[in-house]
Amino acid sequence: ILNVEQSPQSLHVQEGDSTNFTCSFPSSNFYALHWYRWETAKSPEALFVMTLNGDEKKKGRISATLNTKEGYSYLYIKGSQPEDSATYLCAFMIYNQGGKLIFGQGTELSVKP
Amino acid sequence: NAGVTQTPKFQVLKTGQSMTLQCAQDMNHNSMYWYRQDPGMGLRLIYYSASEGTTDKGEVPNGYNVSRLNKREFSLRLESAAPSQTSVYFCASRGDREDYEQYFGPGTRLTVT
């Protein structure tokens, strides 16, 4: 059974704090690692798709790194803002399986003004 | 472009009733997916369709059937609803490359009493 673990499950920070979360995934049969941002009452939206070991991606104040050999990815948010409050999901894509994603349970971030 | 649309948005069923959840996308994507989301469980794949005319089971297919009616539409059917199927259901689609991001619909909140 393939397992994708995210930690922490929830995080409460103050506006302006920088924060990071972890996604652990199987290191075999790796094809891609996705990060999604999911706001309450909305649909998940893709942040990053990462495929190569050592990949680093950035979108504004949010960045992510990938280590496929040891099976983890970090998501960083610099200078958190209240609008960053959401659940952040990572998903592991298995090679040659029609694009199937195995999702972690998510990290719920709450940023207080 | 509407992206991925789902109907209905909300539904309440009694145990044993049947219903079909509809999903359509206007992005000319080949691959489509059905997920369910339960508290603390992240998103779990029910069924997916890599192309028109093909469907495959995901992690939690029991109690569900799917139809890929054409390239645009992918429906999910509950033949005999059970309380354990109370969940939020998301449809998603993906472009041609396996490592492309998935686009999610707004979700259907289903309650089975």
Image: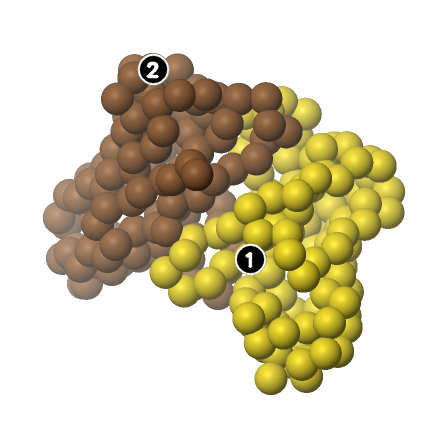
Q: In which quarter of the image is the N terminus of chain B?
A: top right
Judge from the rendering whether residue A40 lies leftward or rightward of residue B62; answer left or right.
Answer: left
Instruction: Specify whether disc 2 shares its chain with disc 1.
Output: no
Q: Which residue is drawn at 52% across and 55% down?
A: A43
Q: Mark 2 points at which residue?
A: A53
Question: Does residue B96 sit above or below B45 in this rendering?
Answer: above
Secondary structure of residue under mark 1: strand
Q: What residue is pinned by disc 1?
A: B36
Category of crowding for the residue at label 2, using alpha-carbon neighbours closer than 10 angstroms: few (below 14), some (14–19), many (at least 20): some
In this image, B80 relative to B111: left or right? right
Q: The yellow chain is which one?
A: B
Residue A64, how many percent across, how many down?
A: 30, 30
The residue lying toward the viewer, choosing from A106 and A83, is A106
Residue at disc 2, secondary structure: loop
Q: Position of residue B22 (x, y in %)?
A: 76, 59
CB contact under 8 Å: marks 2 and 1:
no
Chain represented in brown? A
Q: Chain ID for label 1?
A: B
In the image, A63: left or right of B66?
A: left
Q: Which colour scheme is used?
A: by chain
Locate residue B63: give its quadrant.
Answer: bottom right
